[in-house]
Amino acid sequence: MQITRLEITVHHRVPNPDPIRDALQALPGAGSVEVTLHTDETVHGASISGTSEIYFGRIAGAPDALASLIEHELQPLVLGSDPAFVRATHAAMVRETEYHGTAGLATFGIAAIDTALWDCQGKALGVPCWQLWGGIHSRLPAYAMVGWLNYSLSRVQEICAEAVAQGFRGVKIKVGAPTLREDVVRIEAVRTVVGDDVALMVDANQALSTAEAIRRGRAFQELGCFWWEEPIPAADVDGYAALVQALDIPIATGENLYTPADFARFLRRDAVDIIQPDLRRAGGPTAMLQIGTLAAAFRRSYASHGGGPVQLNVMACLPNAIYLETGLLGPDSPFALEEGCVPMPAGAGFAWS
Ligand SMILES: [Mg+2]
């Protein structure tokens, strides 16, 4: 099987005039880049292709910039390649982009190609990717990230209660308000509606100093929060090591780390308890599997950043996977929760069904 053509489509999106917010930024949405890899192979008369889509929460010009990077830098490495050698293509893309840095948009592009290559391979063989890799979990607990920082207290309570009514046994809210007191009021307000048996995660999106993160972490662990996510700037490995040392509450981070090398630094320094790789910044499923396996060797847990079939297929194969992140279930949700868990997708490649 060979890749014969790349189809790169930019989907622009009208920014939401009332965007969701965390402690770092507003996220009005900025569209996406969809990549389809066409091959010369057919199964039962249908030609095999693989797809991926990379979304941007902000930066209006980013989808066009990424499309250009994929077209001009990565496409020459992918055309004519065999999806069976997806890890070789991944390594070639890492080598090529190293000249200007394999981070930022470069890993977003690598992730787009890598995801679509694995999708081709799964579809050619007629199995979900988790079956190609070898599974360990048939389903995974999911939590709902629903408590944005710009929501009123009553809105946060309402949406967390709705998540629990849908069957979620974990919810996450944003913290990192100007004062600890405001964060505590928010956590206590949510706890009164979700009860004591629901896991309550808190996320400050890099907003605090290390000293303030330790002070708030002590309060959050007394309140029974499940994990303390990205309290300080993502690259501050020494700061994270200090947090892990000072606090009992598990420290979660990783959505803003790039490639397995960043995770290796954090794991070696004992600077994280729960890793949360982002598909785009990690560099696709090939890198996420490496990162997850490395963390398992350090006996650290893996929770997804964002939810979808790619994240779920990856976590199906990781012994240390603990939680899929998702939002509220909509009317056309591709899955139903079973005892708070999402069943593994049954579709070939990364298809849901
Ligand atoms: Mg986060």
Image: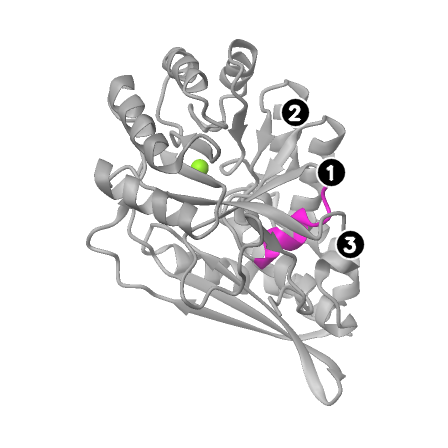
The x, y position of residue 16, in whole percent, is 24, 56
Q: Which residue is mark 3?
A: 133
The x, y position of residue 325, in whole percent, is 50, 45
Residue 191 appears in the figure: yes
The question of residue 313 being in magenta is answered with yes
Residue type beneath disc 2: Leu
Depth order, front residue of 200/51: 200
Sequence-wise, the earlier of marks 1 and 3 is 3
Sequence-wise, the earlier of marks 2 and 3 is 3
- Counting other residues with Cα less than 10 Å from the Cα at mark 1, is it few (<14), some (14-19), or many (20 or more)? some
Depth order, front residue of 302/122: 302
- What residue is at 60 percent from the left and 31 percent from the top? 262
Q: Is residue 35 left or right of residue 299?
A: left
Q: Which residues are magenta?
A: 309-318
Quadrant in which residue 273 is drawn: top right
Identify whether 187 is placed above or below 121: above
Question: Where in the image, quadrant-wise, is ligand 1 located?
Answer: top left
Cα–Cα span, label 1 and label 2: 12 Å
Identify whether 314 is placed above or below 302: below
Q: Which residue is mark 2?
A: 267
Task: Report helix, strand or loop for mark 1.
Answer: helix
- What residue is at 69 percent from the left and 62 percent from the top? 118
Cα–Cα span, label 1 and label 3: 12 Å
Image depth: mark 2 or mark 3 in front:
3
Residue type beneath disc 3: Trp
Q: Is residue 348 left or right of residue 262?
A: right
Residue type beneath disc 1: Thr
Residue 293 numbered mark, or none:
1
Q: Main secondary structure of the magenta part?
A: helix
